[in-house]
Amino acid sequence: MFDVAVIGGGVIGGAILRKLSSYNLKICLLEKGNDVCVGQSKANSGIVHAGFDASVGTLKAKFNVLGNAMMPKYARELGVKYENNGSLVVAFSDEEMITLGELKERGIRNGVQGLEIIDQAKLRELEPNISPNAVGALLAKTGGIICPYELTIASIGNAMDNGATLFTNFEVDKINAGDSFEIYSANGQKVQSKIVVNCAGYGSQKVANLIGDYSFTIGGRRGEYILLDRESGGFAKHTLFFTPTKKGKGILISPTVDGNLLLGPTADEVDFNNTDTTQIGLQSVIDKANEMCVGVPTYNVITSFAGVRAYCDKHDFIIEESNVKNGFINCVGIESPGLTSAPAIAEYVVDEIISKRITLTKNPNFNGVRKPDYFFSKLTVEEKNEIIKKDPSYGRIVCRCERITEGEIVRALTQNPRATDIDGVKRRTRAGMGRCQGGFCQPYVADLIAKVNGVTIDKVTKNGKGSEIVVGETK
Amino acid sequence: MKVYDVVIIGGGPAGLAAAVSAYDSGAESVLILERDDVLGGILNQCIHNGFGLTRFKESMTGPEYADRFIKEVRKRNIEVKLKTTVLDLCEDKTVTAINEREGVFFVRGKAVILAMGCRERSRGALNVAGTRVAGVYSAGTAQKYVNVKGFLPGKNVVILGSGDIGLIMARRMTLEGAKVHAVCEIMPHSSGLKRNIVQCLNDFDIPLYLNHTITRIDGDARVTGVQISKVDQNKKPILGSEFYIPCDTVLFSVGLIPENELSKNAGVELSPKTKGAVVYQNRETSISGIFACGNVLQVHDLVDFVSEEAELAGKSASEYARRGDREKDCVNCIAKDKITYVLPQKIDKNQSGNVTLFFRANGVYKNCRVVVENDGQEVLSLKKRVVVPGEMERVILTEKIIKALNGDLTLKIVE
Ligand SMILES: Cc1cc2nc3c(=O)[nH]c(=O)nc-3n(C[C@H](O)[C@H](O)[C@H](O)COP(=O)(O)OP(=O)(O)OC[C@H]3O[C@@H](n4cnc5c(N)ncnc54)[C@H](O)[C@@H]3O)c2cc1C
Ligand SMILES: Cc1cc2nc3c(=O)[nH]c(=O)nc-3n(C[C@H](O)[C@H](O)[C@H](O)COP(=O)(O)OP(=O)(O)OC[C@H]3O[C@@H](n4cnc5c(N)ncnc54)[C@H](O)[C@@H]3O)c2cc1C
C-alpha cells in the first residue's frame, strides 16, 4: 500500500513526487508512457514567466510569481540549466504601448518585481535585431528560461533517489475508490494507495471521471515550434513576446538554455494526441518571427515540433481535493505558466492539501541535490581526464554534434529514472538533438540501449512499443 | 605537446590518401586521428560496387577500395589513432582530441589537413510537416543499419531526394526484400549519377517522381504513410496535386553538408556555396598551413576524385611542413553564368604547375561551351555535349595561362 500515488509523469507530477519524497512516505508515480515527460512538459517554450500575464487573483498569477522566485534554487539543486535572461513584450504601435502599461500595472498587482517600460532606443540597444517597427517594450527582469524536460526528469530522478517508485507503461484505466484507492492500468497492473494526485495533463479529465468526478473538461490547443541551430543562438538575448491582443499572445522568439533559438508557438484547437506539425503552422511561425525581428536565420532550422496545451474550461488551474472523494486531489488545467509554477504548486499540494489527510514527518535521509544529466562537455580538461581515468567510456564521443560521450549515455540508461528508448536518451543527454538530428549517433545509441538491457537492436524503440527502429534482420 | 609534420583529421579515403602522399613527399611524422573504430570513413558502409573505376580501372566495393589505401598506410611509418575524436582546432594548428586511453590531449601539426568528410541533411532541416514517429531516417543512417548492423529499418519505403545515397538505398532495400514505392525529387532533375538512376531505379522499376516532394508524414508510433505533392517552379507544393502512399519508412537523401565545425572554430574562411573551405590550388585554406580535401572541402560524386584531391593536399602539407609559409600572388576564380561553384576559389600565381578547376553546373545544359575569361579576354573554351549538376566537371589551366593572368578569372557556361 502506498501513501500517495501520483498519476502523470509531467513537470507537475514530478515536482509533487519530489516534494513528497522529502517526507517519510511510501510514494509512487504512474505514467502511461514508456518514459516520463512525454506530454506537455516535453514540448513547450521553456519560459520561466515573470507573472504579469495572468489576471489578478487567479491561481495562475499566484503560483507563477511564487514559482518564478523559487526556480533558480530549485534548478540549481536538481542540476538543471536555468538562465535569468529577462523577457521583453514588444509593442508595435502607440496603442500597444498603452497595453504594456496595463500589463505592467497588472504585474505589479500580481507581485512581480523588476518591471520597466523601455523606449525604442533602449529596446534596440538590448536587442539589435528587433524590427524597426517596434516602438518600445515592457522589460521583465525576472523572466527566465529553463529546459523543461530536464527539469521534469531531474525532479522524478531525485524523488526516486529518495525512495519513490516509478511505474511506466501504466495507463490508469480503472480506480476503485473505497477506504483507499485501487488503481488499475490498461495492461493489468495494480497499485493501491491512500491518496491519489491526478496530474495527468490531457488525460486528467478521464482519470477524474474514473471516480465519478465530472466537474471540469479539458481541451487541447496545439503549439507548433521551429528550432534553429546553435549557431543562431545569439540572435536574441531576451525572450521576445508580442503584445497580447484579443486574438492571443502570438509567438515568441527566445534563446534556449542549450544555446539554440526557439520560434513559436502557434495556437489552434486540436485533439490531445495531435502533435503533428503543419505546413501552414510552420510557415506562420516563420512569418511572425520575421515581423518581430530583422534577418531571422530561418535557414538554420534543425527541427520543428509541436506540443498540445491541456487547458481547462475554467481557464485557471484547478488545484484542490475532489468534491466527489476525499483523498483524491486534482491538479489539472495546468496550462501555461504551469512549468514556471511547478515548484510552487508542489509545495502547496503537499504542505496545504495532502498534509490535511496524512501526517507528514521529514525524511531525515532526504537529499535534494542531483548531479546534472549532461555535464561532461562543460568540464575543464583536468576534470574530464580525472573522469576518463576512472571510466574510459567518457573518452568516447557518441553524439558528434552535441559531443555526448558513451559514459553519459550509459549513465542515462542506468540512473533514475532510467532511459529505455532513443527519445529517452535524447532528452536526458542531448544525443541526437544537434544539427544532424541523430543521423550519425542513433545506431550507436541503439547499440548501447540494447547492450545495457541485454537485448538485440530490433527490440530497441524510439518511444515505446510500436516504434521499433528496425523491423528485423536483413536477408 | 607532441609536434608532427602533418596531422590529419579524419581517416576516410581523403585522410588515408593524404597521409600516404604526405609521407611519400617527405613528411617525417604523420598522424591520422579518426573517431571511428576503423579507418575507411563512409566507405565502410558502401558495400555496393562501382568504386575505383576511374583510378584503378576496376570495380570494387567501398571497403575494398578503402582497404587498398589502408594497406598503403600500414606499410609506412604513419601513426594512426582510432576511436579518437578531434574536439578543437586552433589557428596555431594545435589539435585537441579525446579518446579512452589518453583522455583529452593536445598535439600540434606543422601542417594540418582537414579530412572530416560530410554529414547528411536531416528531415528537420527541411521542416517537413507531420508526426515525428519512428521510421524516418536519413539514407546514410538506414545504410548503416542495413550494411553494418545487419538490420532492415522497414519494409515499405518512400525515399525523398534522388541523390546517390538515396538511389543506392532504393536498390539495397529492394534487394533486402523491402518494397520501395517511390523516389521523390523536388528538382526537375536528379542530383545523382546517371548510372545510379539506371542501375538502382530503372532496373527495379522504382518510379522516380521529379518535381515532387513529401508534404506530410503520418503515423502514430511508426510511419503509416506520406502525402506527396507536385511542386511549381518555385518549389512550392501545388494545391490539389496531392496523392498518398501508405508506407512504414521514409528515407531522406536530401544533400550532404561538409562537416566544418572544427574549421569554423579555427577561423578558416568557408565558402557559402560549397560549405567547405575557400582554398588555393594546393588545397591550402585561408589559414596558412591548414589544408582541406575530400568531402569536407566539396561534396564529391566519386571517391576516385577524393583520393586524387587528397594526394594533392598531402603533398602540399608535407612541403609546407618542410619549408613553411611562402609569399602568395593571388587571383580569385569566380563562378559566373550557369555555374554553382568553382574550386579552387583562389589561385596563387607563385605556385608552379597546371591548375585544374573543378566546377558544377546549376542545371542541365546540352551542347554548350565552358568559357574561362580573364581581363576581358577568353583564355580557354571547352565544348561539352552535356553538363549536369550531379556530375563534377573540370577544366585544366596550363602554367602558361596561370602566369599570364591579370586579375580575377571567371568561369561560365554558354549555350
Ligand atoms: C505549447 C506550449 C507552450 C508552453 N509554454 C510554457 C512556458 O513557456 N512556460 C510555462 O511556464 N509553461 C508553459 N506551458 C505550460 C506547461 O508546459 C504545462 O503547464 C506543464 O507542462 C503541465 O505539466 P503537467 O505535468 O500538468 O502535464 P503533462 O506534462 O502533460 O503530464 C501529464 C502526464 O500524464 C500522463 N497521463 C495522461 N493520462 C494518463 C493516464 N490515464 N494514466 C497515467 N498517466 C497518464 C501523460 O502521459 C503525461 O506524461 C506551455 C505548454 C504548451 C503546450
Ligand atoms: C552513402 C554514400 C554512397 C557513396 N557511393 C559511392 C559510389 O558508389 N562510388 C564512389 O566512387 N563514391 C561513392 N560515394 C562517395 C565517397 O564515398 C565519398 O566521396 C568519400 O567517402 C569521401 O571521403 P572523405 O574521406 O572525404 O569522407 P569520409 O569517408 O566521410 O571520411 C571522413 C572521416 O573523418 C572522420 N572524422 C570526421 N570528423 C572527425 C573528428 N572530429 N575527429 C576524428 N575523425 C573525424 C570520420 O569518422 C570519417 O571516417 C558515396 C558516399 C556516400 C556517403
Image: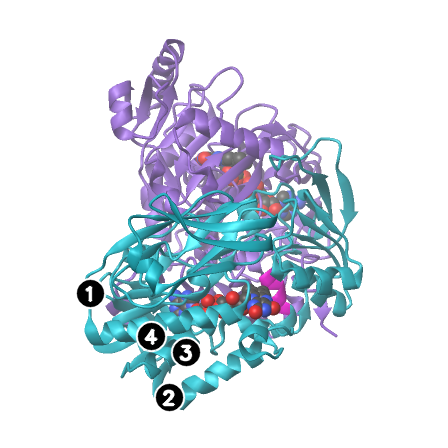
Q: Between B21 and B37, which is closer to the camera in this rendering?
A: B21
Which chain letter goes with mark 1? B
Q: How far is mark 1 from mark 2, CA to CA?
A: 29 Å
Q: Position of residue A67 (x, y in %)?
A: 39, 36
When the figure is inspected, residue B99 is found, relative to residue B367, above or below; the finding is below
User: Is B394 within the magenta?
Assistant: no
Q: How far is mark 1 from mark 4, CA to CA?
A: 15 Å
Earlier residue among tags 2 and 4: 2
Q: How far is mark 3 from mark 2, CA to CA?
A: 17 Å
The amino acid type found where label 2 is placed reads Arg
Q: Secondary structure at mark 1?
A: loop
Which chain letter goes with mark 2? B
Tell me the chief SS of the magenta region.
Answer: helix
Around disc 2, counting alpha carbons within 10 Å, would you say few (fewer than 14), some (14 to 19), or many (20 or more)?
few
For chain A, the rendered hue is purple
Magenta stretch, residue numbers: B139-145
For the residues beneath circles 2 and 4, the answer to whether they share a chain is yes
- Residue B315: mark: 4
Q: Position of residue B344 (x, y in %)?
A: 38, 57
- Which residue is denoted by mark 3 in the rendering? B82
When the figure is inspected, residue B145 is found, relative to residue A272, above or below; the finding is below
Q: Can residue B100 be spotted in the picture?
A: no
For the residues beneath circles 1 and 4, the answer to whether they share a chain is yes
- Which residue is denoted by mark 2 in the rendering? B76
Q: Between A327 and A228, which is closer to the camera in this rendering?
A: A228
- Residue B326: mark: 1
